[in-house]
Amino acid sequence: MPAENVLLLPGMMCDERLWSHQTAAMSVPVHVADTSKADNFADMAAQVLAAAPPQFSMAGLSMGGILAFEIWRQAPKRVTHLALLDTNPHPDKPSNRPVRFEQIEAAASGKLEELAVESLKPLYLAEKNRDDEAMLKTILDMALKLGPEVFERQSLAVMNRPDSVPTLATISCPTSVICGLEDTICPVRFHEFMAHEIPGADLVVIDDCGHLSSMEQPEVVTKELLRLFEQ
């Protein structure tokens, strides 16, 4: 049954601009979730569900994909289609905790822009996109607009996220698992695993694309979402 509403879940320190191309292409109402208010995924999902339509097709990128797992756990009957982009079903590694606390402290002390710039090119983007000044500016603007308090809340949520691997086998709606071939944060093997574990899921791996697939290869992502949401 084709989608009647679309719910888009941004990645960490991203806003509706992450989904600009996809939103413009949709012929049904699109709702971009506010993920800035909670420091854990249970509360974040409850807040998003409270503002969402009764039923919706859902796409989440990175942190948005982690949130999508929690939304599925809380309200599976409300989700008609699911797209998981550049995300990770596994819990955070304990070894990441010191680094995350260091980053929270740095952001609180006025170094959010420095943090964002240091990680942008090498970690988030495919090689061919690392000199795209317009894209880099948008990504930085999103982070700075949200600010250090949101960075802290979202960092805590990601750090303390539950293990979503057991959730994969329970997903029963039409599902696409999408990722950039050059995603170093959530590599292809994570997506191959998710596509194998989710019954009937499709896997789409995009060339010349890193972690921010909806911005780096917007036409490819939009085409796949439109195909999925028509099922």
Image (tube, grey):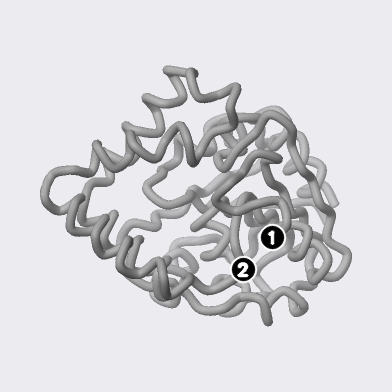
Q: Quadrant of the N terminus?
A: bottom right
Residue most extreme to the left: 109
Where residue 60 sits, quadrant-wise, is bottom right
Going by the image, does 227 lie left or right of 6?
right
Do labels 2 and 1 touch, CB within 8 Å? yes
Looking at the picture, tell me which residue is in the foreground, 20 or 133. Answer: 133
Badge nearest the viewer, 2 or 1: 1
**Whole-percent x and y of residue 149?**
21, 56
Q: Residues within 10 Å of mark 1 (few under 14, many from 20)?
A: some
Residue under the point 13% across and 44% down: 110
Looking at the picture, tell me which residue is in the foreground, 73 or 89. Answer: 89
Residue under the point 83% across and 61% down: 201
Residue under the point 41% across and 70% down: 95
Q: Name the amino acid type tagged 2.
A: Pro
Looking at the picture, tell me which residue is in the foreground, 50 or 161. Answer: 161
Q: Which residue is mark 1?
A: 190
Where residue 139 sits, quadrant-wise, is top left
Going by the image, does 196 lie left or right of 97?
right
Q: Which residue is mark 2?
A: 89
Q: Earlier in the sequence, mark 2 or mark 1?
A: 2
